[in-house]
Image (spheres, rainbow, N blue to C red):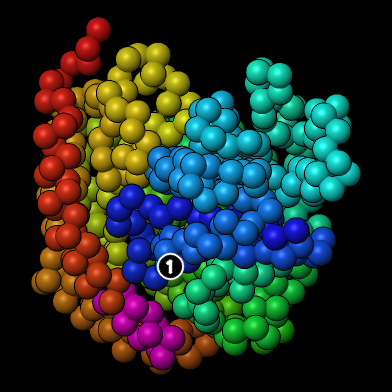
Amino acid sequence: MFIIGIEPKSPGLHIFSQSYVPRLGLPQLLTIAQNLGHKCEIYCEELKAIPWQKVAAADMIMISSTTSTTPRAYTIIKKIREEINSKAPILMGGPHVTFLPEEALNSGADYVFRHEADESFVSFQKWWDSGKPPHELLKIPGISFKMGGQYEHNPDPPRVDLDTLPTPDLSLIDGYGKPTAIPLITSRGCPWNCEFCSEIAMFGRAYSFRSTEKVLEDIKYYDEKYGKVPVFIADDNLAANRTRLEHLCIGIIKNRLVRSYSAQVRLDIAKDTRALTLLNRAGFERFYIGYESTNPASLETAHKGLSFEDMGKYTRTIRKYGMAIHAMWVLGFDDDTLQTVKNNIRATIRWNIETNQFLILVPIPGAQIFQRFKDQNRIFSFDWANYDGHHVTFYPQNMTPRQLQVAVMLKAMPRLYGFWRTARIFAVDNWANAMASFRPRTWHPIRRFRASLLTLIARIWGRYATRKIKKPIRHYLNSIPQMTQRAK
């Protein structure tokens, strides 16, 4: 069977627009399918145009999407159905359709895989190969479909043992070539239950981990295939289990797998200086951290468990141990005001954070805030393409949608990526690097200078992106409400 996967293009610029890093849903599933004996290929629109002649020859089509890429996914499905391939079944998965499966089915998908699809997909393949007896389909967990004109939503699937999954074969991605960074997922789930996040609804309120041995095998597999390419660990929080984190770092060091690593962590990793030391020795150069806000009330809403004073202290500690920071801020919480935006900007400048991303709060399906805003009649746009963190789609509590849009995308981001600000960060980073270079056991001058260069490149691209996005954002301003009160 010839199975293809399609990853729709994002509607606008985003954090990985400069250097493409694939999402791992399709590579994971199609590696499983390949191991079952099927021919598989993946087409990512971020890389190149979809080869429609291949789509026409496919026996099965899989599409993965986030909320903001869902409209493009539905457009692709319509084109396939009407012009390209009317016979192949279309399977959809991802967080958005997990929570709105009937929307996907009404838009042309034949089957929707909700939550973790790894085991459900194997069961589905066996069902398909056995002749597709209808009663057996009802036994496969996590699938939604139409039968006899009715929607069927099978019970949610059980948690997947991550050690049973093969290393995703990224060569299945057409046109990918040698990657600039390898993405790894070593855990799923989260216990924090932030109102604006759908992670718990998607994977559960507990972590499931891939063992240290398996993660090291993954890195060795990519080493053999691509060489010592930088690795980005895309877990929501790599440091969720400190004992496991220490074992992983020690394993990387002992197996001579040290290279440039980056990862998503919580800011409170700074409380564990032993972990920071090991992370530094293992080659971790950059952390992606959700700061969210400097507003104490907003921090409480986001369940950060941190005070403003903690944030400044922990930021300095992380940078002291040689790691750069990409800070992600969310504006638009009910307690936020225009002053909050200004305070966040001041904090990033005061703390010399290398790169920052100011995002507008997104009430995505699956998150608690989506249902709350919907019940309060505060969502004015259900155009999913605008659910990307760059567009206001709801009525904020203490400002108009227009004020929030302008404050974040037309004022804050350009200011953060100004020329002199970039030059200052580059100079400060390298002065600190020079002063610390006499500590060879805990500081790596060459590696730190390389990280500084990557920061400079990222900031130059950020300056370009903030300029490029101005025109579409100004156009969007014409379509959003200017009132402070939501319609009754």
> Which of the 4 image quarters holds residue 257?
bottom right
Q: Residue at x 70, y 45 (%)?
A: 117
For residue 446: magenta?
yes
> Which of the 4 image quarters holds residue 339?
top left
Q: Residue at x 45, y 53 (%)?
A: 8
Q: Residue at x 42, y 26 (%)?
A: 370
Q: Name the residue type under label 1.
A: Leu
For residue 49: magenta?
no
**Quadrant where the C terminus is found in the figure:** top left
Q: Residue at x 33, y 50 (%)?
A: 11
* Magenta highlight range: 445-456
Residue farthest right in this picture: 130
Which of 3/18 is in front?
A: 3
Residue pointed to by mark 1: 47
Q: Is residue 167 left or right of residue 101?
A: right
Question: Residue 366 location in percent, x, y?
Answer: 51, 31
> Which of the 4 image quarters holds residue 70?
top left
Q: Taken as a whole, is the magenta stretch helix, strand or loop? A: helix
Q: Secondary structure at mark 1?
A: loop
